[in-house]
Image (cartoon, rainbow, N blue to C red):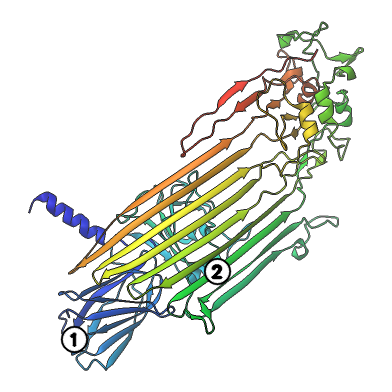
Amino acid sequence: MSMRSRFLIVLLVLAGLGLAQDRGTIRGVVTDASGATVPDAVVTVRNVNTGLTQSSKTSSEGVYNVLYLPTGDYTVTTEKTGFRKAETSGVAVHVATVSTIDVVLAVGAVDQSVEVTAASPLLEVQGTNLGKVIPKNAIRDLPLFISGGLRANLAFVVLTPGVIGAANNPRIAGGLLDGQSEQLDGAESNSERRNDPAMNGVSVEGMEEFKVQNSSYSAEFGRTSNGVINWVSKSGTNMIHGSAFMFNRNEAFNARGFTTAASKRPIVRQWNPGGSVGGPIYIPKVYDGRNKAFFFFAYERSSNRNGQSTSLVTAPLDEFKVGDFRKLVDSTGKMVALYDPIDAAGNVIPNSADRPILQCNGVANVICPNRIDATAKLLVGMLPHPDNPNLLTANYRSRSYSTSKSYLPSIKFDYVFSEKHRINYLYSYFRSPATLSINQFEGLPGSGFPSDSTTVYHRLNDDYVIRPNLLNHLTIGFNKRNVLEAPESVNKFPFDLAQQIYLKGNPNQLISGVSTVYGAGGATWGNTVFTDSRSRTTSVKEQMAWIKGRHSVKFGMEYLAGIYRRLSNNNTWGNVSFSAAGTGNSNIANTGNDFASFLLLRPAAAASVTRTIPLFTGLTMPGTCRTISRPPPN
C-alpha cells in the first residue's frame, strides 16, 4: 500500500470521529465476563422522553455505534442469545459529543436482565473536538442579567473554559472577535455582516443546550476564526410540559439616591414576560401523536424604558440666538472676541487673520439682525430656553430618554415516520421595531438612528437509517435579516421645514422624515445615518456515516451561500457643521464661536453630500461622493 493510500485512510478514520453538528453519538464495546468481545449483539437505544428508538449490531470486534441521536436522556439495551439482557439507564446524549457506554454481558437466559445506571465520564476520550457542553439544567437555573432587552443565549458562553471578553462578543481560545461560527440546530446562524450580539434565534426558554468548541474541530467545522458554538433547540416529549415567567423592573422598587434633599427615583421600567409549552400532537378521537409527532413552542418579549437623562448639556443663551454674544467669556471672565468673515462689500475675506472685529452699529460681538441667515433663524426658533440662564455652559438638563421593544416566538415540530426515518422543523421570528428617537433638546426632532430589525430562521433536519451500518443526515437552513437604521417613523422631522432648509444644489431628492443636517452650539438638527441592510443565508449539509468493524467513517458536503445588500444613505441629504474658526482670527488664540458661525451660515468646510450605490454579496463598494459648496449669503 502506498504512503498516499495510508494517509487517505487515516484521514477517513479521523473524519469518522466527527459528529453531526446538532446531534450526539452513543458508542462502546460489548464483552462477556471474561473480557472477550461479543459480536452480533443487538444494541437498542431509546429516548425515555419521546420513545425514539434506534438499533445497531456489534461488529466482529464487539464494537457498536449509534449515530445522529437528538440530545436527551436514553436507555441502552443489549441482547444476545445465551446472555442475560443488559439495560443501562441514565445515558445522557449531548450536542456534538460522544457518550461511551461499554457493556458486559452475563451468561444466562435472554428473559433475565441486568440493570446498570450509567456514570458520567470525567473526560471525553472519543474524537478531537475540544469543548464544553452547557446542559439544560444550567441554562434553566443560572441567573441572567436583564438590561433592556431579551435574555441573551450568548451570556452563557463566557462560562466555558477558554472564553474571555464580553458576552455579546466573546473571544474563544484566543480567536478573533466576531469570528465565531454560531450553529443553530445544525445550520449557520450568524449574519452576513457581523454576528448577532445576543444570538436571538430561539428564546432562552426554548434552548435545550449548547456546546462551545474551541479547537481541534472535526472535518465538518473549520470555517471560523473564533471557535464554534452549537445550539440545540428543545423538542416536545410524550408528556406535556410548560413554563411561564415574568421579569418586572420599576423605579417604585428602587431605593432613593444618596442626596441631601428628597429626590425622585429615575425611571427604569422593564417588562419581560414569556413561557413555553411542548408535548405530543394529540387530538382526542382523531390523532394520537405520542411516540410519533411532537411540538414545542416558546415565546419571549421585552419592553423597556429609561427615564430622562441626568446629563447636563449646553443650550445657547437667549441673547446668542438673536446675535448678541457680549456674554461670551472664557474661564477667566474675559470676553471671547468674534471676527467678521465678510467685508463691507459682502465678499468673503480669504485670510482669517485679516478679519475685523464683528460688530453691529459699533457694538462688538453683536451680529446685526438683518445678517442672521434665514435658515439659521428657522432652526434657532426651535431651541428651548436654558434651564439656568445665568450659566454659559452645562445650563440645560438633557431631555433625552430611550425605549425599546422586541419579541421572539419560535415553534419546533418533530415527526417519526419509522424507526429508520425521522424529521424535525424549526421556525423562529425575531422582531425589534424601531422606537422614537428623542433629542436632548426639547422641541427638536430626534437625531439618532434606532434600528428596525427582523430576523427569521428556518431549520429542517432529516435522519434516515439506510441499513444498520449506513446512516444519512440532512440539514437545510435558511436565515433572513432585514435591518433598517432610522426609518421614517423615528425622527419626525417636519417635511415643510426640511424643504425650507434643504441644502441648495443637492442632487438627491428629499423624502419624508429626513433633512439636511445642521450642527452648532451643542444642538443637532436632523440625522446623518440612514441604511437599509437586507441579507439571507442558505445552507445545505448532507452527511453519511458508514460503520465498518471498529471504525466509523463519515463523509459529506456543505453548501453555504450568503447574500448581503446594503443601501447606505449616510449624508445623502447633506451635512453642514460649524466651528469657531468661522468667526475666529488665526493669529489670535481663543477667538470665534461655532454658534456665531452658524448664525452667519459660515460652515467649517464645504457641506458634504453622498450619493449611494447598493452593496451586494457582502462586497464593500465605495459610494460616489460629491462635495457641494454653498455660496456665502449676500
The answer to whether residue 148 is seen in the rendering is no
Left or right: 603 with respect to 467? right
State the residue at coordinates (46%, 75%).
Answer: 293
Name the disc covering residue 76, or none.
none
Neighbours of disc 2 within 10 Å: few (<14), some (14-19), many (20+): many
The picture places residue 226, in percent across and down from the top left corner, at 41, 49
Question: SS class of the residue under badge 2?
Answer: strand
Outermost residue to the front: 286
Task: Using the image, determine if residue 16 lies above or below residue 117.
Answer: above
Residue 629 horizontal side relative to residue 473, left or right:
right
96 left or right of 405?
A: left
The local crowd at label 1, few if under 14, some if 14 to 19, many if 20 or more residues have their Cα within 10 Å, is few
To which quarter of the image does residue 114 belong?
bottom left
Name the residue type under label 1. Ala
Name the secondary structure under disc 1. Answer: loop
Q: Estimate the x, y position of residue 459 in percent, counting from the top left.
A: 45, 60
Name the residue carrying label 1. 33
Dot in front, 2 or 1:
2
Q: Where's residue 155, x and y in %?
A: 53, 59
Q: Residue at x 78, y 57 (%)?
A: 258
Residue 528 makes an appearance in the image: yes
Q: Which mark is residue 297?
A: 2
Query: In front here: 193 or 214?
Result: 193
